[in-house]
Amino acid sequence: MTSCQLYLISPLDVSGAFPDRLARALDAGAVAAFQLRVKGVNEHEAARLAEPLQVLCAARDVAFIVNDSISLAKRIGADGVHLGQGDGDVADARAQLGREAQIGVTCHASRDLAMEAGEAGADYVAFGAFFPSTTKQTGHLAELETLLWWQGLMELPCVAIGGITPANAAPLVAAGADFLAVSHAVWGGDEAAAVRAFAEVLGAAN
């Protein structure tokens, strides 16, 4: 089994001093990927906001993933795209972004959706929410059983998401999550301290 790593998701506001916060978080260790998740701005503005963040990630060999938008991912040359259930399909993303792109799919708590995503050629699937989340409305609660089932059956990496904190992360790692997707637990306080706390949990569990 590969070691579990952090998958950081941006807050909705990445303007102002946020690039400095991202640099601090990335330099604290254990982060494998960063997802840009901005809402309510046009693609031109999103691309402008993405640029300094993408540079920071590239310098640290952290994958830069765009949430929802295949066209934005293509425009800025992102490392990949994360698709919700209503954001387009894997085949279209692959055709536009190429073979090397990392394409992830939100599968909620559904084994069927995860199997479909894998068959369609996704690079990873995301299960959640595992805990109530302050970042977005939680319509689907996933169970540890889902991670155990997936790991026993599939080679494709899986991401656990939803309300994950350093205090509740260990069972998810033990159940086989390859990545923990976290947002508020990092950006809601001291980002470097939070990443270090997660790294400690991951180090102990891996």
Image (spheres, rainbow, N blue to C red):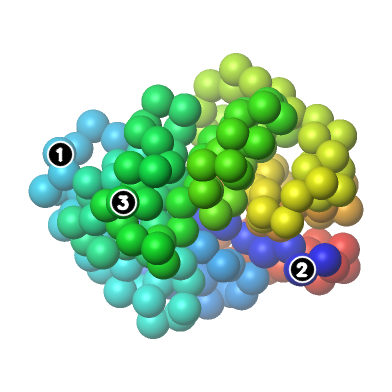
Tag 3: Cα neighbours inside 10 Å, few (<14), some, or many (≥20)?
few
Q: Position of residue 8 (x, y in %)?
A: 53, 55
Q: Amino acid at mark 2?
A: Thr
Q: Position of residue 38 (x, y in %)?
A: 32, 42
Q: Nearer the viewer, mark 1 or mark 2?
A: 2
Q: Which residue is mark 1?
A: 42
Helix, strand or loop at label 3? It is helix
How many residues crowd mark 2 within 10 Å: few (<14), some (14–19), many (20+)? few
Whole-Å distance between the Cαs marked 3 and 2? Answer: 29 Å
Q: Residue at x 15, y 39 (%)?
A: 42
Q: Is residue 79 left or right of residue 6?
A: left
Question: Eyeballing the image, is 143 above or below 159?
Answer: above
Q: Is residue 11 visible?
A: no
Residue located farthest toward the front when viewing the structure as drawn: 119
How far apart marks 3 and 1 lie (CA) works out to 23 Å
Q: CA distance from mark 1 to mark 2?
A: 38 Å
Q: Nearer the viewer, mark 3 or mark 1?
A: 3
Q: Quadrant of the N terminus?
A: bottom right
- Which residue in the structure is indicated by mark 3? 95
Q: Residues within 10 Å of mark 1 (few under 14, many from 20)?
A: few
